[in-house]
Amino acid sequence: MKLPFALARRFVAAETFEETIPKIKTINESGIKVTLDLLGENVKEKTTADDTVQIYKQLLNKIHEAGLKSTISIKLTMLGMDIDQEYCKKNLFDLLELAEKLNSFVRIDMEASDYTQQTIDIFKEAFEKYGKHVGIVIQAYLHRTKKDIPELAELGADIRLCKGAYKEPESVALQDMEDIRKAFKQYAKILLEKTDYPRIATHDDELINFVKNYTKTENISKDRFEFQMLYGLREETMEQLVKDGYNARIYVPYGTMWFPYFKRRLMERKENIFFVLKTMFKK
Ligand code: FDA
C-alpha cells in the first residue's frame, strides 16, 4: 500500500526536484543554505544505483544552473554499497568529479553501524582525492566515535556532527540522552578546535547553547562553523540563529522514497507523531 505523500509533507519538501526548487529558494532568501537529499537507501540492483548516480549528477548541474545555495547529501547504500564496495566507490568518485568541476560539495550521510567502517574507509580515499568537495557525518552516540573523531579531525576532514538516528544495541552505541549529549559536547569541542568548519547538526537547545557559549569564550568566530537542522523543524530557531550572525544550513529531503526517513523522524520524537496525526485528521 502506498501511503499518501501528504503525511510526510512536514518533513519532506516534495516528491520531485522541480517542486523542491521554490522551497530551496525561499530558504536561501532567509539567509540559510541548503543541503539537498534525494531520499532512498539500500539499493540492491546495479541499474538502480547507476540511475541514482545520473540523477545526482543532474541535481548538481541543476543546482548550479539555478544558482541555488545548496550542496547535496547522499547515502552510500544508494550508490551500491550493499552490492559491492569498489563499485560504490567508483560511483561516488564519478559524482565527485562533477562536484569538483562545479566547485560544489557532496556530504556522505552516515547510516546504521554496519556501514560505519566502510563509509569512513571510502570517505578517506575520497577526501585524499577530492579534498574540500567531500565531507562525512559522525554520530556522537557510537562508542567508536571516541577514536574516529580525533582521527578524522587530524586529517582536516569536513565533519557534520549529529547524535545518530538509527536504533543501535548497547554494545555499539550510548543509549542514555544525557550520555549522548555529553559525548556530543566533547566531540564538538574537538571539531571546533581542530577543523576549519565543523557542522553542528542538532535541534537540541542544550547543545546549541553549549556551542554558542563555548565558541564565545574561546573566541571562535561565528563564521568558523555552521548549525544544521532538518527541513520542517525549528524554522524560527534557525531564522533567529541567522539574525544573531550564525551560519545555518537546512537539510532538505525530497523524492518518492520518503518512508524510511519519515519513520526515523517519527521514532525520534513523539511530538512529530502528533504533527502527522494532525495532518491526517485535518479536513
Ligand atoms: P532530539 O530529537 O534528541 O531532541 C532533543 C531535545 O531538543 C528535545 O527534547 C527538545 O528539547 C529539542 N528539540 C528537538 N526537536 C525539536 C523541535 N522540533 N522543536 C522544539 N524542540 C526540539 N543522523 C544519522 O544517523 N546520520 C546522518 O547522516 C544524519 N544527518 C543529519 C543531518 C542534519 C542536518 C540533522 C539536523 C540531523 C541528522 N541526523 C543524522 C539525525 C540526528 O542523528 C538525530 O537523530 C536528530 O537530529 C535528533 O536529535 P536532535 O539532537 O536534533 O534532537
Image: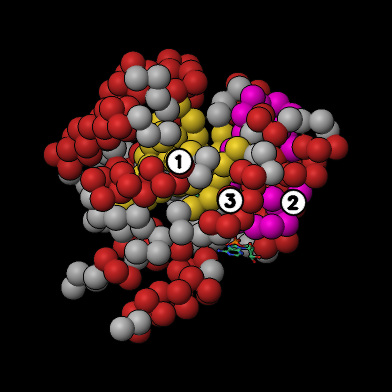
In which quadrant is the N terminus drawn? bottom left
Q: In which quadrant of the rendered view does residue 248 lie? A: top right
Q: Is residue 33 above or below residue 111?
A: above
Tell me the SS state at disc 1.
helix
- Sort mark 2 into few (<14), some (14-19) or many (20+) by Cα contacts within 10 Å: few
In the image shown, does 186 or 142 lie closer to the viewer?
186
Q: Which residues are magenta?
A: 189-210
Q: How many marks?
A: 3
Identified by mark 2, the residue type is Asn
Q: Are marks 1 and 2 in contact (CB under 8 Å)?
A: no
Q: Residue at x 36, y 49 (%)?
A: 23
Q: Which mark is residue 238?
A: 3
Q: Which mark is residue 209?
A: 2
Q: Earlier in the sequence, mark 1 or mark 2?
A: 1
Label 1 vs label 2: CA separation? Answer: 24 Å
Could you say where residue 111 lies in the image, as x and y percent from the top left? 44, 47
Q: Which mark is residue 43?
A: none
Report if residue 201 lies within the magenta region: yes
Assign ligand 1 to one image quadrant. bottom right
Identified by mark 3, the residue type is Met
Q: Is residue 228 above or below residue 63?
A: below
Please state if 79 lies on the left or on the right of 130 as rendered: left
Identified by mark 1, the residue type is Asn
Please state if 235 lies on the left or on the right of 98 as rendered: right
Could you say where residue 171 lies in the image, as x and y percent from the top left? 60, 56
Q: Earlier in the sequence, mark 3 or mark 2?
A: 2
Tell me the SS state at disc 2.
helix
- Sort mark 1 into few (<14), some (14-19) or many (20+) by Cα contacts within 10 Å: some
Cβ at disc 2 under 8 Å from ligand 1: no
Residue 150 visible in the snapshot: no
